[in-house]
Each structure stands twice: as structure tokens, then as C-alpha cells.
Image: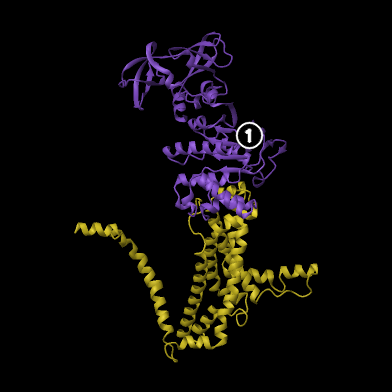
């Protein structure tokens, strides 16, 4: 397969009967990169992947592989490999036939096809299962066949659509490492779609966070984890406490915000001035019990191994999620503090569709994490 | 006592089995008994011993040939019904506007019944029907094409009534095949033809075999249209007409029963052959929702 230097998506847009599934996705993928498209369901990440694969025509925009335009080609002429969420293995063909299907379609000479098929099957450790039908394999093994089938063509780009979402937790961790290993060994370029932020952070070189069809932020895992660009990315990156507040005063990057009977100091993200409506985001790990903070009543305590997760309610009824080293009892009154470095203050956009009340908004974030 | 009941229940023997009684009685009274009676009757002809009726049928070329006449009609008709349904159903498997209307139009012939279809065929394809008048006015032919009261009239009638069955069955088999399989094949470099014949067709083949058997059995027992739009004394003297004549004109019930048994055996042989071929194909899950 031809290798490219870069793949450019320019204003890729897809509309479904008046509804914008994906709006103006512009992204340059360098050869050898592992890109994760991350977002909640319905954010347009699978649409983006299908547009790349050629399974969905674009409404607007274009896709370029170096100097050649790609979005007008049918899927069979793009030379990309794709791993589907349900694996889409041909049920009537053995593992070996599934893997060699693409080589046959590309009229690779028989001897070479056999060698490459063997190699791909070996790469995913399925040598003993080569003669079996997909129905006789476990979920994890089927997953491996799907990967072998996609990479045997040495595609210039591998597309993966939530490939791990049908596996159990342990297998998911193993396959995560496996996919990353294959990516590195073969020097592949990979676009990986997932709704699992942990998966995306651990596997990808760069992440693209989507919401309602629009790009929210593009960056390395570190960038997204420590400096989310807005409250939606923060929500997705584990900032489980998202508190609607108002700016009381601002001093450089440090903003003092208040609301619902709480006063917090945090780091401003974007331009803020006193009186602005904002959302203060803080991770449960960065909230801790300490003197002189916000008084709360402990409601739910969950054991999580090294520490306990605590859900507590302030006197005004706002729910906070925090971690504690020692196990408090439900009903205990404690005081909660946070390092201003670890509290991010985002402008509350007027367009925020999540105009839900305080308690509900933190609940919603819990649901999405 | 309770231990025995538990053991029986584990093998599916419990009081719920009593629910099967009404249905079993119906089958026994309405199917098994008449069938056994007819079978017995076919071995008791007035003369010629136990196999006399069968000998009468097979020794008389006029009777024996009804078998071939019927096969010559029903095999091509069933084949055409299946073959024509595949591309149409393939094209219609997705969701699109007007699908329900189109399906309804294609299925309407089922509701018409053979007599109405036959009447329509006589009017449309007959010597003075629209079809021939159009052909002649354009100047393609000088004399009307003979398309009714012969083999073709019955053939068309079988296609019109058999196609909706085949189409509906194949459409449901097709929608049982996971559409992402073809998308996967496309990303692996397969154009539309390899996608169809390497992925979809092998998964559809068992369904095609079943559909063929059902439409064949329907066509093999053709009776009204063989008389109404056919040539019941000659080229479309099908086996059911032979049975009818034996029973209600010659009043030779043993011979009629023997013909009916022969009819069943021929159907059984064709179905067995088709299902034998079917077992060669993959018959497991096709990954779809159907």
C-alpha cells in the first residue's frame, strides 16, 4: 500500500435529513500517529470515521491524502483497513479466509497472500484457531481476527470503531495494550473512535474531543487531561464536580468565584471579568477534607481500594464528589478544600444546552464519565 | 413420586404438554387420518392387485406424462420466482421512502387469487388483449402471439402468484444478514459484485433453497390456472388434473389416490434434493437482527 505523509480533513461535514451529525471537522493526521476521536454517543465520532472510510458520503468538505483527493473514491479504492464495533467477520468463512479476503480482492499472488495471512494470524496469536469459523471463537478472539483482517493489507490508515466496547473489563485492558503494540510494531497510522476517556488517554498520541458534531479540543493526552479547553471537555476528562458560579474578583489567572454559599479560588480558562457566569470544575481526586473549606455532609461512601469515593452535600444542597484516604461515615460533617491550581474556571456559554440546575448538572456529569 | 415428577419435568414432560392435545387432535383427524386412508385406498384397486393403481398410472403414457408436464411448468416457474426476487429484494433491503408502498404493490397478487389472475391474463395476453394489440399496432408482429390457453398462460400465472411469496421470504432472509458485513468487504477492497457473490450470496443460499422449495410445492399443485389459462387436455394437463379426472369423472378413487401419492413423492424428491444441496452451504448465524 502507498504510504502517505499526511492526511488532511478539511471542513468535513455530514448532515442527516437536516440534522448536523458532524460540522466542519478540520484535522491533519501525520503518518504514524495514533489519533483518538473521543466523545459521548451521538457526538459524531462514528460519522467522522465512516466518512473517512468512504462508507458515508460527505455533505461538505474534502479529504486529502498528501496531494490526492480521497473523499470522492468509494471505500474499496481507499486502501484503509477498518475494525468494526461488532467485528463484522464473515460468518461463513474460516479465520484464515476472513484474513486473506482482502488480499484476494487485491489480487495478491497466492504464495505471498499465504505468507502474509500466516504472519497476520501469528501477530494476533490465533495460530491454533486459523481453521475455525468466527462463531466458534470467543469475543476477544473475534476481535483479534478483525484486527488481523484489517492490518494484513498493510493499510496506510487503520480505522477502529469502538473495537473494545463489546469485551469485558479485563480483556479490554489486554487488547488495549495489544492494539498499541501492533500500531507501534507495524508503524501504522490509526484513527480510533471511543467514548471511553481512559482508553483514549492511554492509547492515543493525540485526542480529538467531539460534542454535537463539533470539535471541542485537539491535543495530546497530557494537554487534555491538565488543561481542558472548556467545561464539556473537562466533563469528559473526569472533572466530575462542575459547579455553576459567578466571578467575584480576578487577579491575573486566579479567579475567586462564589455561588450557592461557596467561595472557591481557581485558575481561569479564557478571558473572564468580575460578574461573569462561570463553571468551576474540579476532579474528585483534587477535592479533599481540610480545615477552613466548604462544610459538607457525607451521604454515600464507596470503597475503591486505595481510597474511598465520597459523595457529600453542602448546606445549600449542592452535591460534591471527592476522595478520602480514611473512611468517613454517612452523616459525618466534614470540610472540603481544593488547591486553586487544580480548580479550573470556565466561562459558562449562553448556548450551553445543559442549562440544568446545579445538582442535576453534577449528576449528568457523573453519568457521562 | 415427586422425584419422578422432577425427573420427567427435566426432560420437558409436565402438565403443559396437555396444551398440545387440541393441535395434535386436529392434525390427526384432518391430516394423518385422510392421508393414511388415501394411502390405503391407493393399494386397493378394483383389479390388478396391490400395486394395480400405480401400474395403471405408470403404464399409461397419457397419465405418466402429466408428471413431466407438471415438472416442466413448476421447476422453471419456481426458479424464475427465486431468481427475480433476489435482485429486487437486494435493492430494497435498506430503508428508503416509499418502500412500504412498493412492497404492497409487489405483494398484491397474493390477495387476488388464481381465478382473478387468470381472468386478467386472458384479457391482457389473449389474442385480442392489450399486449397483442400493442405489439401489432407498433408493427412488431403481424399475427397475435399465442400466450394464453397454452403452456405460457399457466407459466405466467404461476409467476404472478408465486413471485410475491418468494419476494417476501427472500426480503426477510436478506434483512437477516448484517449490513456491516458488506461494508467490511468494501473496506477490504471488494467491489459490488464480489461483495454480493462472496459475502451476501453464500449467506443467503440456504434461504434461497427454502424459498425455492416452497414456491416449487405451490407451483407443482397448480390446478385452477392450468384449466383457465392453460390447455387442460394437452400441453398443460398437469398431474392434479389427472387426479381430478380419475376421482370425479372415472370415479376410480384408488387410481386418484395413487396419483396423489405419486404427486407427493415427486415433491418430496425435489425438496430432498434441494435441501441436500443446501446442507453443503453455511447455515449458521448471519449476524443480523432477523
Helix, strand or loop status at disc 1: loop
Number of marks present in the image shown = 1
Q: Position of residue A96 (x, y in %)?
A: 53, 52
Instruction: Return the residue found at the far right.
Output: B139
Placement of A73 over or under B227, stated as above or below: above
Q: Quadrant of the N terminus of chain A?
A: top right
Query: On the rendered structure, is B118 left or right of A140?
Result: right
- Residue drawn 57% across and 23% down? A351
What color does chain A have in the rendering? purple
Nearest to the observer: residue A52 or residue B247? A52
Q: Position of residue A67 (x, y in %)?
A: 72, 36
Q: Is residue B252 visible?
A: no
Nearest to the observer: residue A303 or residue B37? A303
State the residue position of label 1. A31
- Quarter of the image for residue B228 reads bottom right
Nearest to the observer: residue B125 or residue B54? B54
Q: Position of residue B167 (x, y in %)?
A: 57, 60
- Quarter of the image for residue B62 reads bottom right
Q: Position of residue A35 (x, y in %)?
A: 58, 33
Nearest to the observer: residue A108 or residue A150? A108
Q: Which chain is yellow?
A: B
- Quarter of the image for residue B127 reads bottom right
Instruction: Return the residue found at the far bottom.
Output: B47
Query: On the rendered structure, is B261 left or right of B231?
Result: left
Placement of B102 over or under B118, stated as above or below: above
- Residue drawn 65% across and 53% down? A107
Instruction: Return the residue found at the far left.
Output: B1
Amino acid at each position: 500500500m502507498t504510504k502517505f505523509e499526511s492526511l488532511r480533513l478539511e471542513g468535513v461535514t455530514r448532515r442527516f435529513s437536516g440534522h448536523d451529525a458532524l460540522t466542519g471537522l478540520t484535522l491533519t493526521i501525520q503518518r504514524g500517529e495514533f489519533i483518538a476521536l473521543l466523545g459521548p454517543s451521538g457526538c459524531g465520532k462514528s460519522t467522522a470515521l465512516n466518512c473517512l472510510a468512504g462508507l458515508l458520503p460527505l455533505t461538505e468538505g474534502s479529504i486529502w491524502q498528501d496531494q490526492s483527493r480521497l473523499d470522492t473514491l468509494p471505500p474499496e479504492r481507499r486502501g484503509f483497513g477498518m475494525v468494526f464495533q461488532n467485528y463484522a467477520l464473515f460468518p461463513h468463512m474460516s479465520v484464515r479466509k476472513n484474513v486473506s479476503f482482502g488480499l484476494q480482492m487485491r489480487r495478491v499472488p497466492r504464495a505471498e497472500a499465504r505468507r502474509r495471512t500466516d504472519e497476520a494470524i501469528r501477530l494476533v496469536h490465533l495460530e491454533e484457531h486459523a481453521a475455525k469459523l468466527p462463531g466458534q471463537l470467543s469475543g476477544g478472539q473475534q476481535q483479534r481476527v478483525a484486527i488481523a483482517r484489517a492490518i494484513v493489507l498493510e493499510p496506510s490508515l487503520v480505522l477502529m470503531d469502538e473495537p473494545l466496547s463489546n469485551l469485558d473489563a479485563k480483556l479490554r485492558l489486554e487488547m488495549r495494550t495489544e492494539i498499541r503494540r501492533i500500531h507501534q510494531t507495524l508503524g501504522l497510522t490509526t484513527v480510533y473512535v471511543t467514548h471511553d476517556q481512559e482508553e483514549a488517554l492511554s492509547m492515543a498520541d493525540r485526542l480529538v474531543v467531539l460534542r454535537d458534531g463539533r470539535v471541542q479540543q485537539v491535543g495530546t493526552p497530557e494537554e487534555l487531561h491538565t488543561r481542558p479547553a472548556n467545561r464539556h471537555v473537562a466533563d469528559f476528562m473526569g472533572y466530575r464536580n462542575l459547579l455553576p458560579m459567578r466571578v467575584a474578583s480576578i487577579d491575573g489567572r486566579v479567579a475567586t468565584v462564589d455561588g450557592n454559599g461557596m467561595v472557591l479560588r481557581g485558575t481561569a480558562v479564557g478571558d473572564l471579568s468580575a460578574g461573569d457566569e462561570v463553571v468551576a470544575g474540579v476532579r474528585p481526586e483534587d477535592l479533599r477534607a481540610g480545615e477552613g473549606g466548604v462544610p459538607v455532609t457525607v451521604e454515600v461512601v464507596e470503597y475503591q481500594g486505595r481510597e474511598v469515593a465520597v459523595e457529600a452535600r453542602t448546606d445549600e444542597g449542592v452535591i460534591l464528589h471527592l476522595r478520602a484516604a480514611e473512611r468517613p461515615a454517612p452523616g459525618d460533617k466534614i470540610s472540603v478544600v481544593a488547591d486553586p491550581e487544580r480548580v479550573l474556571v470556565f466561562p459558562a456559554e449562553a448556548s450551553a444546552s445543559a442549562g440544568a440546575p446545579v445538582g442535576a448538572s453534577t449528576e449528568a456529569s457523573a453519568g457521562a464519565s | 413420586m415427586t422425584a419422578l415428577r422432577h425427573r420427567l419435568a427435566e426432560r420437558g414432560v409436565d402438565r403443559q404438554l396437555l396444551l398440545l392435545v387440541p393441535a395434535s387432535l386436529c392434525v390427526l383427524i384432518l391430516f394423518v387420518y385422510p392421508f393414511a386412508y388415501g394411502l390405503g385406498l391407493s393399494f386397493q384397486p378394483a383389479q390388478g392387485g396391490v400395486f394395480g393403481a400405480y401400474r395403471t398410472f405408470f403404464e399409461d403414457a397419457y397419465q405418466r406424462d402429466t408428471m413431466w408436464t407438471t415438472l416442466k411448468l413448476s421447476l422453471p416457474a419456481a426458479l424464475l420466482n427465486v431468481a427475480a426476487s433476489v435482485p429486487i429484494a437486494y435493492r430494497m433491503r435498506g430503508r428508503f421512502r416509499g418502500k412500504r408502498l412498493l412492497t404492497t404493490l409487489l405483494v398484491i397478487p397474493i390477495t387476488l387469487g388464481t381465478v382473478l389472475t387468470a381472468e386478467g391474463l386472458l384479457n391482457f395476453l389473449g389474442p385480442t388483449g392489450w399486449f397483442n394489440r400493442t405489439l401489432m399496432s407498433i408493427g412488431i408482429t403481424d399475427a397475435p402471439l399465442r400466450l394464453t390457453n397454452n403452456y405460457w398462460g399457466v407459466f405466467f400465472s404461476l409467476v404472478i402468484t408465486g413471485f410475491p411469496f418468494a419476494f417476501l421470504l427472500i426480503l426477510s432472509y436478506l434483512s437477516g444478514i448484517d449490513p456491516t458485513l458488506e461494508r467490511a468487504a468494501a473496506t477490504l477492497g471488494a467491489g459490488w459484485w464480489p461483495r454480493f457473490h462472496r459475502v451476501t450470496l453464500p449467506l443467503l443460499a440456504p434461504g434461497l433453497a427454502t424459498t425455492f422449495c416452497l414456491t416449487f410445492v405451490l407451483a407443482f399443485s397448480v390446478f385452477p390456472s392450468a384449466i383457465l389459462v392453460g390447455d387442460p387436455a394437452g400441453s398443460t394437463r398437469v398431474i392434479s388434473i389427472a387426479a381430478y379426472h380419475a376421482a370425479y369423472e372415472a370415479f376410480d378413487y384408488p387410481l386418484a389416490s395413487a396419483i396423489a401419492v405419486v404427486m407427493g413423492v415427486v415433491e418430496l424428491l425435489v425438496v430432498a434434493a434441494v435441501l441436500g444441496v443446501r446442507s453443503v452451504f453455511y447455515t449458521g448465524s448471519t449476524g443480523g437482527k432477523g
